[in-house]
Every structure is written in C-alpha cells, then in structure tokens.
Amino acid sequence: MSLVETIRSEVLEEIEKYKNESEDHYDFWNEHIKFVYEESINLSKIYDANLTIVKLGALLHDIALIEKVGDRKDHHINGAALSKSILEKYNCPQEIVDRVIGCVINHRSMLDCPLAMSAIGDKPLHMLLKAEFLDTKAAGFLKSLGSVFVKRGFNDSEIAATEEL
C-alpha cells in the first residue's frame, strides 16, 4: 500500500469515528474532503503539480477538525502539527512533509481573496486552495469558471521525482 493510500485509510477511519461520535454526525469525506481531494487531483494534472503532495495535502487539510483538536479558527495551525506527526509516523521524506505541512497551514489564507491565488508559487498548495475555494465559496458560477484564477506557471522541479511514493 502506498503512503497516500495508507494515510487515506487512516483519515477515513478518523472521519468514521467523528461521524459516529460527534453531535453533528458530519461526514467530512462525502460532504467536503472528497470533493477537495478529487478536484485537487484534477487541477494537479492540468498544472503538472506533484500528485503525492496534492493528495496528502487534500486528505490532511482538515485533520484538526476531524480529530477535534483546538478551535475551528486555528484548525490550519493544529492540522499542520497533526499532519507532521502522521507523515513522520510513516517515515515520509522531509521535503514531502514540509510541502504538505505548507499546504495544510496555508489552506485558509487565500479563501477570501480568490484573485490573489494567481500569485501563489507552490503548485500543490495552489491546487488545494483552488479546490477548497471551489467547494466552500464558489457554488455553481465559480465552479463553471474552472481555472480562471490560475494565470501563471510554477516551478515544481525540486521534488518532481516523487510523483507517487
């Protein structure tokens, strides 16, 4: 089983626990993360982003909410710490850990300013932000616009060889 598949299984288990034990029984997978995961993958193919980082960032971006760690307003910060622990538990290469943590900690930073997304220089983070934006803010109209906010190319060469661990 690949690193992505292993972490996906772990996240799905945590989501199932949350769904069964929480008062709201929110299904993070079917109501949010699945869309972000799939849309991030689709976007990563268009923009040639590192698929491993994109998948891991999408899977882990709301892990603090799923595991009920801290307040919602700080879930990106708490999620980065949880993501680091999860990735290190599976001996993930440090450059992947750093990039995934970057995705998780920054996944909220551009959501209220979509035009600023064109300035992002990190492809995996950009794909996650764009998918998150489409799911949480864009309903219908912006989804139909697709890649309108992505105007520049990105350099992802430093870890291009890690397409899938």
Image (cartoon, helix red, strand yellow):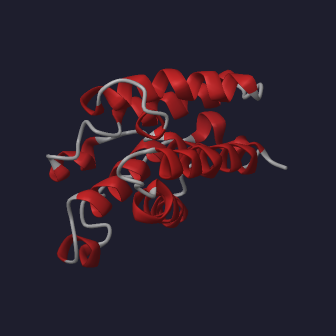
Q: Would residue 152 appear left or right of 6 to someone viewing this image?
A: left
- Mark count: 0
Q: Nearer the viewer, residue 16 or 51?
A: 16
Q: Would residue 23 appear left or right of 148 to someone viewing this image?
A: right
In the image, residue 61 above or below residue 135: above
- Residue 134: where, in percent of width, then height? 29, 62
Image quarter of the C terminus = top right
- Residue 40: where, in percent of width, then height? 47, 58
Q: Would residue 141 appear left or right of 71 to someone viewing this image?
A: left
- Residue 111: where, in percent of width, then height? 22, 46
Examine the rendering and report whether any part of residue 127 can be seen.
yes
Q: Who's the residue at 40% across and 63% down the image?
A: 31
In the image, residue 128 above or below residue 76: below
- Residue 26: where, in percent of width, then height? 40, 55
Q: Who's the residue at 20% across and 59% down the image?
A: 137
Q: Who's the residue at 24% across and 30% down the image?
A: 73
List the single residue furthest toward the right. 1
Q: Nearer the viewer, residue 24 or 78?
A: 24
Q: Nearer the viewer, residue 18 or 42?
A: 18
Q: Nearer the viewer, residue 28 or 40?
A: 28
Examine the rendering and report whether any part of residue 163 can be seen.
no
Q: Would residue 130 appear left or right of 93 to someone viewing this image?
A: left
